[in-house]
Amino acid sequence: MYKKFFNLKENPFNVNPDPRYLFLTRSTQEALACLTYGIETRKGFILLTGEVGTGKTTLLNKLLGWLHQENVATAFVFNPRLSVSQFFDFMMADFGIPCESRMKSQVLIKLNQWLLDRYQAGERAVLIVDEAQNLSPQMLEEIRLLTNLETSTEKLLQIVLAGQPELEGKLNQPQMRQLRQRITLRAKTLPLTLEETRGYINERLRIAGSDGSEVFSAGAIEAIHQYARGIPRVTNVLSEHALISAFVDQRKPVPREVVDEVAHDFELLEVDPASQAMAAAEVPLNGISAAGAPLNGNHPPLVESLLQALNTLVERLNNSEITVEPERARQTETPTEKEP
């Protein structure tokens, strides 16, 4: 709808995890290098974590593309809410290992022989489990036991567990210590900085066929970063709808006020709990924050009004002549028992 207006050949902000659109920030480069290094050197268990929408699945798709080019056998489990037997069925089918029996002992025998054959041929096999924070403790233990498929010197199966930060919390539980100890490499995806958001948007526009003309104003990109808080998935949603709105109004480049309107429609103006907690930790008294910094007014409107109200209250208390008698206060805190 808006492609011709903005001189684009395709939609640049689809939320599908297309590896062509992977934007390599420093954190994603480090994460991708960690994954490829761990697989090449047969490290066994690798953990990839990151907040919702920070590009884990896109990164995994990029990894899968590289693995297929390197003739590495892969099994990609993207829905971990499976029973143990269903999980093994899915894994064996994705690896392309025929197995007539559904008995776990027979499945493991088949898998072990197949891995040994690939190892002797100098080839590797990788199991990737996405959304691993949803794995049950029982399933995590079954996956851990797969690392026992090994030679005296190397692991036969490389395993990548990818999930949200809740996965780390699950692995930190005492009953998960055996699995936690087997994780040899850890990688993370992080939210984008403002500069990375600018590069992210421009790179996606370039891949979508932009001729280099300005599509988003500088103010619009700053607004997108502010509302999305650096989360690529939210950045895509805001950018896509901002392009649509700007096209309808025939405005080019996209101005900041269009992004503000889209963010309001998606109810992204509210202060999230983390920001509220941070603001509460830095409540200013008489214009001075708890950290000793002057109140500069650079707060969201809701927080700013709350801070001003609190300052007014503090000033009224400071100017008040009301006092509490020490003896009366002590009696209030520790009342004595009345005599009969």
Image: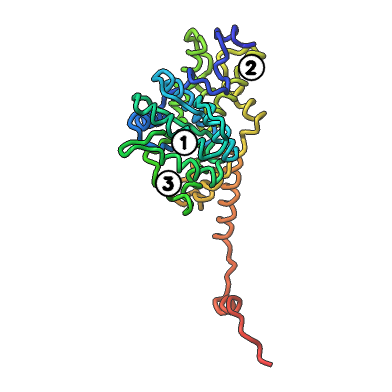
| Residue holding disc 3 | 180
Label 1: element kind: helix
Estimate the x, y position of residue 187 in percent, counting from the top left.
Answer: 41, 35
Which of discs 3 and 2 lies nearer the camera? The answer is 3
User: Type of residue at label 1?
Assistant: Ile
Mark with earlier residue (3, 2): 3
- The residue closer to the viewer here, 306 or 21, is 21
Estimate the x, y position of residue 11 in percent, counting from the top left.
Answer: 57, 14
Residue under the image location 56 percent in, 78 percent down = 330
Residue count near mark 2 (Cα–Cα under 10 Å), binned few <14, some 14–19, many ≥20? some
Numbered label attached to residue 244:
2
Q: Is residue 55 left or right of residue 79?
A: left
User: Type of residue at label 2?
Assistant: Ile
Which of discs 1 and 2 lies nearer the camera? The answer is 1
Label 3 to label 1: alpha-carbon separation: 26 Å
- The residue closer to the viewer here, 96 or 193, is 96
Q: Is residue 238 left or right of residue 198?
A: right
Residue count near mark 1 (Cα–Cα under 10 Å), binned few <14, some 14–19, many ≥20? few
Q: In this view, does 300 lie to the left or right of 34?
A: right
| Residue holding disc 1 | 109
Q: Are marks 3 and 1 in contact (CB under 8 Å)?
A: no
Residue count near mark 3 (Cα–Cα under 10 Å), binned few <14, some 14–19, many ≥20? some
Estimate the x, y position of residue 163 in percent, counting from the top left.
Answer: 51, 37
Estimate the x, y position of residue 115 in percent, counting from the top left.
Answer: 41, 30
What colour scheme governs how the chains and residues are painted in the rendered image of this protein?
A: rainbow
Q: Which residue lies furthest to the bottom in this view?
A: 340
Mark with earlier residue (3, 1): 1
Label 3: element kind: helix
